[in-house]
Amino acid sequence: MKKSLFSVVAAALLMICLTVSVSAAAPQRFKPRELRMGVTSSDTSTWTISARKFAELVAQRTGGAVKVSVFPNSQLASGNQIKELEMLQNGAIDFTVTSTIFYTGLEQKFTVVSMPFLFSSYAQVDKFRNGPLGEEILSLAKPKGITGLALGENGFRQVTNSKREIRTPEDIRGLKIRIPGIKMYISAWKALGANPLSMNFGEVFGALQQKVVDGQENPLDIIASSKLYEVQKYMTLWNYSYDALIYGVNTANFQSWEPELRDIVVKSIREAAAFQVKLNRDRDVSNLKIIKDNGVAVYTPTKADLAKFKAAVAPVYNEYRPILGADLLQKFQNLSK
């Protein structure tokens, strides 16, 4: 009996020694890291949902060694989207999910994606996102210290306001419309006869509620997830501008990681971006219903109405052709042919 017990104990000790020996010989595949990802929009938006999916994929594929913490509403930059992008540039944040609109402050050529009435369908958009033009746009961030890893989408931007239904450019005249900080939108909205005002998105709900501005423009997911329908009465579903997202990483930080981790990050972020695009489009229907169910009157312009809006913003193309480069602009315009 004693001999049998001794044998069991000896075997157990041997197993422990072997386990320790193997562990010492095979170090952990990845250095433990805590990375930070800033997201411009709210915690219920498709942007944030996809960011959390990315974090889950990275954790799974690194055995929990690499943790990505997600901060919606530009929390790390006190709600300032421009500052958040600057933090990505200097490496204070590892990743961001934000619109190409905010990248225009780094490089004006990003503006081409959002030119007014450039795209008329998601089929045209996908030619851009999934083709060489998508890679060309992502590459514009490289000289700025940012590596663009994938394109998502905020979607087509719609206009809401608390004053009146917008059916023609005449209905826009005199309205105070909040816009993001992009010069092209200032030109476009002035051409439409509005008084455009730029402010951080975190201030928009309060500004609408207090009537500091009459309206704003954003895709359906942002309007619904931010509950802007509580302070707006009318919406025109006109798809006037497309808004893409860039899943970006600080280049210096990215290059300092193990090659295998870099591969995992690229694979995971592209999966998350594809997931975000599908979710965003699936949500279009439900978001529109939420907006209508909350009492917002929704108008869809006719082709004749759209022709008037397009004619009104035609000067914007003349202004931006030399800024964007005639070749780049033409490549995008060819997508609609």
Image: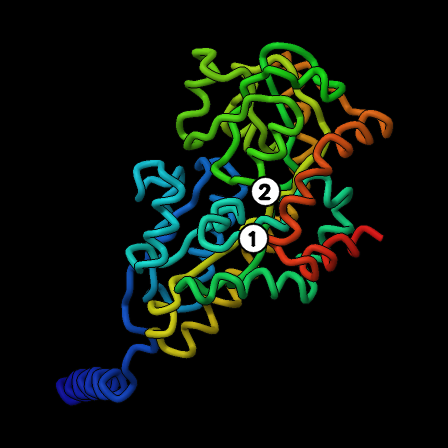
**Residue designated by label 1:** 110
- Front one among 322 and 157: 322
- Front one among 71 and 76: 76
- Evaluate whether residue 127 shows in this view: no
The kind of secondary structure element at disc 2 is strand
Question: Measuring 77% from the left and 44% from the top, which residue is drawn there?
Answer: 121
Label 1 crowd (10 A; few <14 / some 14-19 / many >=20): many
Task: Indicate the position of residue 154 as horizontal and vertical percent values.
Answer: 59, 42
Q: What's the amino acid at mark 2?
A: Asn
- Front one among 105 and 322: 322
Q: Quadrant of residue 184?
A: top right
Is residue 122 left or right of 144 when viewed as pictured?
Answer: right
Q: What's the amino acid at mark 1?
A: Phe
**Residue designated by label 2:** 154
Do residues under tags 2 and 1 come within 8 Å of each other at their CB atoms?
Answer: no
- Which color scheme is applied? rainbow
Q: Which mark is residue 198?
A: none
2 vs 1, front mark: 1
From what the image shows, is residue 10 above or below residue 204?
A: below
Q: Quadrant of residue 234?
A: top right
Is residue 260 left or right of 246 when viewed as pictured?
Answer: left
Task: Indicate the position of residue 69 as horizontal and vertical percent values.
Answer: 34, 51
Task: Indicate the position of residue 104 as horizontal and vertical percent values.
Answer: 50, 49
